Amino acid sequence: MPRPWHLFGAALLAAALTSTALPAAVAATVPADEGATAPPGQAGADQIQWPQGAFRALCGARQGAQPDRRTLRLAAGTQVEAVAAKVSRDRQGTLLWAGHVVGHPDLPVILAADNACGSGVPRVAGEVHLGTAEYTIDADQPGVSTVRRLPSHRQASLKDDIRRIAPPVGPAAPRLKPLPRAAVAAPVIDLLIGYTPATVRHTTGGAAALDLKVKASVEGANKAYADSTVSARLNLVGTFATQEWDGDDKDLEGMLSALSDPKDALYSSDFGVGARKMREDKGADLLHVLTQFTPAAGTTYTAGIANTPTLPIPKPATGPSYSTEGQAFGAQQSDTLGTYHLAHEIGHNFGLNHDYHTDPIEPGEEGYQAGNYNPYYPDNHGFLPTDRTWTDIMGYTMACDDEDECETKLWFSNPLQTYDGKPRGVPLGKPGPADCVRVMNLTGPVLAGYRASSTSAVPARYSLTGASSNTDGGTVTPAATGLFDKGDQVTLTAYAKAGYKLDYWAVDGKIQSTRPAAFTVTMDGDHFVTAKFVKSTVALTRLPATITKVSPATGSTKGGYTVTLTGAGLSSTTTVLVGTRTATGFSGLQGNDVKAVDDSTVTFTMPAWQKAEAVQIATAAGRTLTASADFTYVPS
């Protein structure tokens, strides 16, 4: 846990949620309508109903499409509208939706859905972060998720949530100088998650619900990495049920010792031995175990703990040598698992410390502990701004001036990035350095090398680069950066400067048929995407036409019925042809009564055809072919 939790009454476990005051730009009040059917993603006071097809629009390629938006009602009268930054599918077919509240990139929204593209209702888990409030969406059963608001106010003394691991003391070795930022690579850290049997038994929905919760948390952690420019990514290699844990379910420190401390009596227990064997079998670099327990009202408790090596050292290729590969474990409470807790505890595995208010480095200061200062990575701290109004992933809200108003930002300290015009960290060489991203980009490859992956076939990953073709006119912000799996849908956003407007998008040099400010790319290969900006007084480039839908797509050979073409760039259409493409153009018949309704719609009357077969419909502007689509004639 990044911090102890203080339970007030039954707030954490309450099924029914109360309406919460949110920033005006985030919250919206909706009229009660008990008789209405909730659209996909909306909910009652404490549940979200997910009808069949709620995510089906995301199941195919969406090149150039607007990013997916959906409304989530978190409590009676309170709802948020979220927009996707990245949509992907994992090896098991789970749809992973990573985005944020519309207009608030610093308020993440994560969803994980099983059966998103199947014939039944989806099963969905996720989380919504609103700065001072966090909602978790539990996948209790297919079609229905329970929404819980996690408490944010903490009044408790600090508890240690890390197990620091210092390098061995031996023959004099030169102290390492702090290194500059690492070149961006793409280390993949294989993560394995275990559940104690009691956790599975006491979780509504069992292992299936836990699996989705974990997948959403991993996706959220990877989004935090991407948003912070951390080069590493987590790869969930699997989940499993551990052997029975004989200790107290709340004893996370005992669990961690059983996993990582050979001197602990429980290190040789079935629990410890079995979990480490599963790690070896899966080739996992990191292993974290979840336990479920219900604290008594008014008590403080630890929600997570992890090994924190001072200097992560790779596993040697051959021969005995010291390595921190045996200190790559964590234990967490399942109810509070989410992006924040998972990313925080794994942050400790990277070698990160808390903010300076929580982990002071001067002996004699309240809260000082040996190890708060890391001579190898002195900038391994979370960042707390001078006004102490928010913390990042490695911070504690209790470090803020007013914990009730303190916001948790799901990013890592990085002085090269800004929030509200101010740096989100302090560079090395200045007092109080805080640059977790620099440290993670150095230690990430070490973690990724702890174990060789047990998966022989490495899936193809593709690179995406987004840029402005003329930086005087505007910029392009990748909503997510780095390498992506085949089929991932990634959103890029164009921002025009004053006096300019977006002219067009080009993918690998090919001008696209739409010009939305937010442009979605489906990763089917390496892509270089550019946005062209022009002055506001300049006429826009005519975009190429495209047909995305033909309705109906089949019809009688007799003809005489109206066909509607839907797409983009169709306003200049003067002719519609039916037939086949040739080496020099098109061969076929003209449609009748052609009408360009607007830029996205054309209607015409289908001509009769001599036999039942597949043909093409082509639009033309004058004598220039502009777009085509398939149509099938059927017998009369």
Image: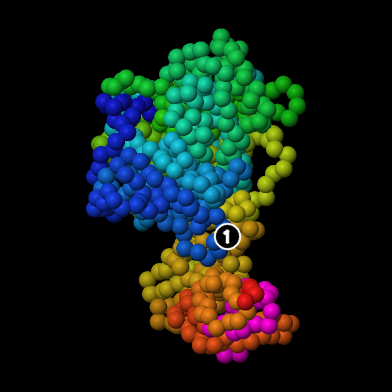
Q: Image quarter for residue 299?
A: top left
In which quadrant of the rendered image does the N terminus lie? top left
Q: Image quarter for residue 317?
A: top right
In which quadrant of the rendered image does the C terminus lie? bottom right
Q: Which secondary structure dominates the residues rendered in magenta?
A: strand
Magenta region: 605-630
Which of these two is toward me, 152 or 488?
488
Furthest residue toward bottom? 622
Question: Which residue lies at the image location 62% right of the left edge and 17% below the top edge?
Answer: 273
Q: What residue type is labelled 1?
A: Ala
Q: Position of residue 296 (x, y in %)?
A: 32, 19
Above or below residue 598? Residue 64 is above
Which of these two is toward me, 117 or 490?
117
Q: Is residue 588 left or right of residue 538?
A: right
Q: Where is residue 138 in the image (x, y as percent from the top left)?
A: 42, 37
Q: How crowded is mark 1: few (under 14 residues within 10 Å), some or many (20 or more)?
A: some
Q: Position of residue 58 (x, y in %)?
A: 52, 55
Q: Which colour scheme is used?
A: rainbow
Residue at which label 1 appears:
61
Q: Image quarter for residue 509?
A: bottom right
Magenta span has 620? Answer: yes
Which of these two is toward me, 588 or 482?
588
Which of these two is toward me, 151 or 586?
586
Furthest residue toward top? 265
